[in-house]
Image (spheres, rainbow, N blue to C red):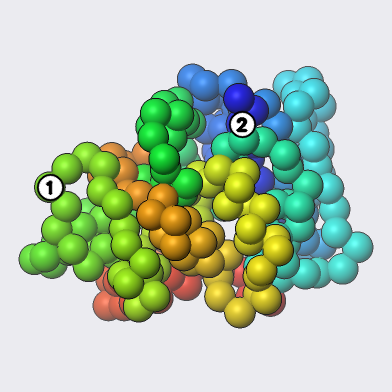
């Protein structure tokens, strides 16, 4: 079984190395890593190029777009390139727990799961994790509008048609979900939401109630905004 990873990059030099380290040091070997720089104006491309060369990462490939595509089209381009059986999506500024790939691959190998989203910890711009007050009847840092009682929970289509419950950086999908997404997407919804919907149509969208990444928030205004709109909008996006 081949495991692939797609990272969309745009002006991410400040936190890139920490995220690249957390991917490189995973306890489960990633067969294919595709990093697509969306015409960064900082040193992101150069940093990644040096990183790949320095660690001799022959299974990592860095691509630079000719024109800025925006985050949705950039992730779509990455999904068109990778050919893994299980595909992980990555932002440029988080910090993955070193067993993230191992845990999620193990869960997806044993069942009919088509997309799997783990929980996460909030992390501030200095790398310190923090908690938000839990709202009764919600889970996954209040993004999921239901109380989960088990480690693994199916998310039904009805719930997903109302709102998404997970960031793409917490997700892994199977190849058949990627293939269907590339056939039908019109780019109207965020890619992570659409991938979850496609999986839920086949009763294959699941939430794993284990935090496996530290999700970086960049300033206090963003923290307050995300807490206020938790579960309604997942808007940590690069501007198109």
Query: Height in image: 102 above or below 139?
Result: above
Q: Residues within 10 Å of mark 1 (few under 14, many from 20)?
A: few
| 154 relative position to 199: left or right | left
Q: Residue at x 14, y 58 (%)?
A: 147
Tell me which label, 2 or 1, sits earlier in the chain: 2
* Residue 108 higher or lower than 120, as above or below: above
Query: Could you say which is closer to the camera, residue 2 or residue 88?
Result: 2
* Residue at the spot of label 1: 149
| Residue at point 47%, 46% (across, down) | 114
Quadrant of the image occupied by residue 69: bottom right
To which residue does mark 2 refer?
A: 3
Q: Residue at image x 83%, y 48%?
A: 63
The front one of 65 and 189 is: 189
Whole-percent x and y of residue 37? Answer: 77, 54
Please tell me which residue is depicted at 12% across the width and 47% down the height of the picture: 149
Q: Of helix, strand and loop, which one carries label 1?
A: loop
- As drawn, is 236 to the left or to the right of 16? left
């Amino acid at each position: 079984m081949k495991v692939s990873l797609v990272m969309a990059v745009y002006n991410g030099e400040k936190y890139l190395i920490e995220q690249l380290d957390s991917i490189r040091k995973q306890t489960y070997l990633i067969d294919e890593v595709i990093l697509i720089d969306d015409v960064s104006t900082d040193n992101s491309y150069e940093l990644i190029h040096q990183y790949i060369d320095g660690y001799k990462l022959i299974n990592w490939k860095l691509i630079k777009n000719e024109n800025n595509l925006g985050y949705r089209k950039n992730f779509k381009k990455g999904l068109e390139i990778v050919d893994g059986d299980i595909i992980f999506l990555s932002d440029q500024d988080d910090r993955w727990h070193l067993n993230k790939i191992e845990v999620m691959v193990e869960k997806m190998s044993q069942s009919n799961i088509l997309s799997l989203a783990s929980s996460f910890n909030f992390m501030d711009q200095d790398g310190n994790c923090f908690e938000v007050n839990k709202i009764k009847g919600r889970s996954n840092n209040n993004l999921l509008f239901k109380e989960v009682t088990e480690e693994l929970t199916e998310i039904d289509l009805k719930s997903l048609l109302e709102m998404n419950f997970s960031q793409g950086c917490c997700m892994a999908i199977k190849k058949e979900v990627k293939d269907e997404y590339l056939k039908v997407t019109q780019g109207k919804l965020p890619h992570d939401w659409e991938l979850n919907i496609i999986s839920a149509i086949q009763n294959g969208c699941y939430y794993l109630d284990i935090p496996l990444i530290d999700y970086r928030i960049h300033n206090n205004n963003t923290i307050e905004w995300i807490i206020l709109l938790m579960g309604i909008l997942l808007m940590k996006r690069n501007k198109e």
